[in-house]
Image: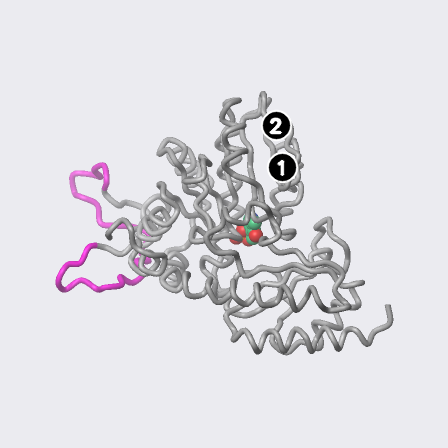
């Protein structure tokens, strides 16, 4: 592929094999768990067994690696990818900085498993302030953060962390590699849940890492093989197939969220609205995600809003074709009970605006 092509072009063409007459343009999933070996025995580079070796998985890794700009590995889920990073870069006595307002199960893993191994865990809010990085081994950032949608200046934090010898990883789940290229901005590693906008059809769980250096990837590849946290070949095939429309989907989701921001801000029932465009670092993103968070007075108001909405499903996860809303307090996020993370789908903007307004109006009839 030429170097300087646009996002849609990269999404459509990344991770496809070289053209060869008679070969399929889009190879199907290769599901076998074992491969014919040479009678003389296996040689380096041969595919032998499905846990370490699968060509469908390698095609997806080539595609994601091309989009993120570094060698990539895919995992059974975002959580499997993030824990692979943590378990291969940290050892007892090390210090790790993680977001205090980021994905809650990463915080839970840190406060239980990592802390139990004698790893020192420091939490810092995405928008800062950050602690001094002296003695820190790994700084994990999440920008935009989930669910508050705060941003951090990745380049500045990376410079400060590198000056103290720390590694910098960025959870790129909300942005996707089209929205943000952390490796270009200065990070050493990208981790992400592909379950969200990357796969985008609410039908597959997947995670990935991408790194500036092959040596970091090698450690995580060994970990993946030993822990067994591989995605199925069929899921890899589904995600590679979904990547072709990532740019299209993201554009519509992003436009829908941007259209809802003023609608939410001007409605009397809405107490606060959070959108990455509010951040001084918004230009770090090439395209804003299709997410907007907002606060209603109470959980009861959110329930009334969800009951009245016809196009907005109550669901967790985000980044899918369908618009969904999640009241994050119920999952243990430290946000008020009426806090909603809205994930805009690819519906027509006017329909979504109308439905949101009607649902807010309906919820307003509840007394406060
Ligand atoms: C969903 C999510 C994860 C975990 O991904 P899974 O695919 O559900 O394991 C990690 N980080 C962020 C920011 C997420 O939104």
Foreground residue, 124 or 94? 124
- Check if mark 2's residue and mark 1's residue have beta carbons within 8 Å: yes
Q: Is residue 225 magenta?
A: no
Foreground residue, 115 or 167? 167
Residue at image coords 43%, 50%:
177
In the picture, measured across the screen, residue 224 lies left or right of residue 95, that is left
Foreground residue, 102 or 232? 102
Residue at image coords 17%, 58%:
19
In the picture, measured across the screen, residue 121 lies left or right of residue 195, that is right
Residue 310: name its quadrant.
Answer: bottom right
Residue 65 appears at what percent x and percent y?
35, 46
In the picture, measured across the screen, residue 303 lies left or right of residue 156, that is right
Q: Counting other residues with Cα less than 10 Å from the Cα at mark 1, is it few (<14), some (14-19), or many (20 or more)? A: many
- The span shown in magenta is 18-45
Label 1 belongs to which residue?
Answer: 110
Dominant secondary-structure state across the stretch colored magenta: loop
Give the spatial CA distance, label 2 vs label 1: 8 Å
Residue 73's place in the image compared with 31, above or below, is above
């Amino acid at each position: 592929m030429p170097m300087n092509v646009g996002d849609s072009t990269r999404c459509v063409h990344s991770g496809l094999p070289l053209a060869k007459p008679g070969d399929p343009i889009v190879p199907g999933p290769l599901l076998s768990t074992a491969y014919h070996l040479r009678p003389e025995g296996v040689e380096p580079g041969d595919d032998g067994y499905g846990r370490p070796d699968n060509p469908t998985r390698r095609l997806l890794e080539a595609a994601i690696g091309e989009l993120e700009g570094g060698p990539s590995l895919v995992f059974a889920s975002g959580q499997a990818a993030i824990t692979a990073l943590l378990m291969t870069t940290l050892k007892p006595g090390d210090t790790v900085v993680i977001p205090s307002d980021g994905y809650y199960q990463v915080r839970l893993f840190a406060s239980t498993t990592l802390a139990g191994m004698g790893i020192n865990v420091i939490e810092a809010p995405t928008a800062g302030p950050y602690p001094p990085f002296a003695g820190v081994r790994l700084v994990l950032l999440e920008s935009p953060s989930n669910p508050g949608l705060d941003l951090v200046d990745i380049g500045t934090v990376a410079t400060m962390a590198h000056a103290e010898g720390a590694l910098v990883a960025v959870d790129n789940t909300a942005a996707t590699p089209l929205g943000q290229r952390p490796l270009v901005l200065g990070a050493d590693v990208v981790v992400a849940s592909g379950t969200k906008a990357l796969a985008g059809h609410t039908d597959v769980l997947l995670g990935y890492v991408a790194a500036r250096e092959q040596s970091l990837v090698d450690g995580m590849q060994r970990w993946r093989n030993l822990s067994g946290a591989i995605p199925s070949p069929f899921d890899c095939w589904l995600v590679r197939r979904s990547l072709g429309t990532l740019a299209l989907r993201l554009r519509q989701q992003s436009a829908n969220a941007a259209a809802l921001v003023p609608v939410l801000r001007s409605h009397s029932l809405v107490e606060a609205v959070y959108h990455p465009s509010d951040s001084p670092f918004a230009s770090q993103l090439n395209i804003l995600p299709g997410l907007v968070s907002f606060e209603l007075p109470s959980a009861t108001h959110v329930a009334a809003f969800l009951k009245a909405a016809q196009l907005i499903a109550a669901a967790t996860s985000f980044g899918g074709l369908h618009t969904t809303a999640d009241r994050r307090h119920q999952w243990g996020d430290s946000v008020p009970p009426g806090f909603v993370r809205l994930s805009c789908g690819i519906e027509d903007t006017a329909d979504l605006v109308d439905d949101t307004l009607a649902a807010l109006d309906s919820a307003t009839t509840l007394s406060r």
